[in-house]
Amino acid sequence: MISRITYLLCLCLCFTLANSAFSSEPYTAALQNDLIDVWLGTGNGKVSKGIYHCTLNTVSGKLSDPTVVAEMSGPGFLAMHPKLPVMYAVGGINGEASVAAFSIEGTLRKAALKFMNSLPIGDGGAAHVSVDKTGHTLLTAQYGGGSTGVFSLNTDGSLKARTQLIEHEGGSRAVPGRQDSSHAHWTGFSPDNQYAFVPDLGLDKVVIYKADALNSDLQPHGFGQVAAGGGPRHMKFHNNGKWIYVLHELDLKVTLFDYDSANGTMSARQTIETVPAAELKKEQFKSCSEIRVHPNGRFVYAANRGHDTVTAFSVDQQTGELTLIERENVRGATPRNFSIDPTGKWLLAAGQDSHTLACFAIDQQTGELTYNRSVVFAPACICVLFGHE
């Protein structure tokens, strides 16, 4: 028979363990491995103050409240160095359109960014930024200036120099006022790092460059053509490197291209709408914004502003062609950007005008999205970046 004191001690221990199991504290030591960094780029406005950070619990899909980690004017788009804890942002530095480098410091719950340096872009503000797979070259796309900026990087990830500013010429003029001139909108590299791609909304083309990443040099190589008035905005390679999905901002469609890696060429094969024209008749504003390929390669997602939805497509694994799955409301206004976490379980949709970041569970078999009721305040969020990107 145990003593009364021993019994009381055991009872207290059981109560303590039970209480801790139901604690309102969102993150425990055992849960740290289930958290992932989420970095948020924001627009230049009265609400946002710069770059924000929060965490995603990859088990529950719950988001922590975003906090400011670097003050900067309109750090709209962000990119990660592929090998170093360094982040890049395009925005305003002392009133000048620039690209900035930040070292990532702290922990998940107390993440911080330390300013390293910045360089002026020289052709107005950038709409996008990316880094090649070796970490030698950074690219920016200037929507207003219609150009591609090329920057070399130092070994510590800081910005070294702008090596090129390539002006795009012309405009398709298919949509008056939107395509009278060039509007470069996105930059990125082929899986083998041999070519760079710049979708240009004003040209109705994806401009292709032969890339020498080691020397931060691009040379014209050709282009991929979308239908007149499409307005290519963003693009993504499929996981197999054989297919490219180009999102049309203006006519809310996606074009599938077959990609020839040996020659660095792309050929259009399928174009599919993200939202039927009939559903857009009452919208005062309508525009596609972002496209993503699921980590398992079976699904593609595209965001629709105005309609305020994310369209889910299934991918034919033999042809790459897309078939509609569903359209899911983003529980916010103006989804300018969204991203999928590295596990492929969660999609985070940013509402630029609603100042929200909402989480959706992804069905791994069907690709369908389910809102999990986790939504946080994210001021004028226009870029969602996970630590792996």
Image (cartoon, rainbow, N blue to C red):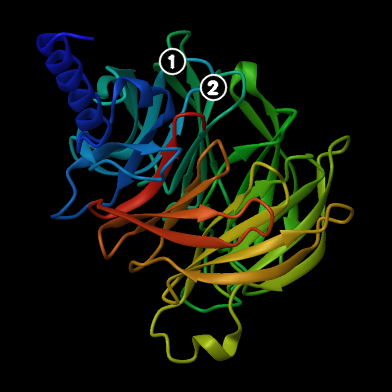
Q: Secondary structure at mark 2?
A: loop
Indicate whether 198 appears above or below 189: below
Compared across the picture, whether 63 is left or right of 317 comes to: left
Q: Residues within 10 Å of mark 1 (few under 14, many from 20)?
A: many
Q: Position of residue 370 (x, y in %)?
A: 49, 61
Frontmost of labels 1 and 2 is 2
Q: Nearer the viewer, residue 301 or 172?
A: 301
Indicate whether 119 appears above or below 91: above
Q: Position of residue 84 (x, y in %)?
A: 47, 15
Q: Is residue 89 visible?
A: yes
Q: Quadrant location of the N terminus?
A: top left
Q: Nearer the viewer, residue 87 or 266?
A: 87
* Residue on which the image places disc 2: 82
| Res. 182 image quadrant | bottom right
Compared across the picture, whether 97 is left or right of 242 comes to: left
Q: Position of residue 374 (x, y in %)?
A: 33, 53
The CA distance from mark 1 to mark 2 is: 10 Å
Compared across the picture, whether 209 is left or right of 99 comes to: right
Q: Quick check: marks 1 and 2 in contact, CB under 8 Å?
A: no
Identified by mark 2, the residue type is Pro
Q: Residue at 50% across / 86% down in the picture? A: 280
Q: Nearer the viewer, residue 127 or 175?
A: 127
Q: Residue at 87% across / 56% down in the picture? A: 319
Identified by mark 1, the residue type is Gly
| Res. 4 image quadrant | top left
* Residue on which the image places disc 1: 157
Counting residues from the start of the chain, the first of labels 1 and 2 encountered is 2
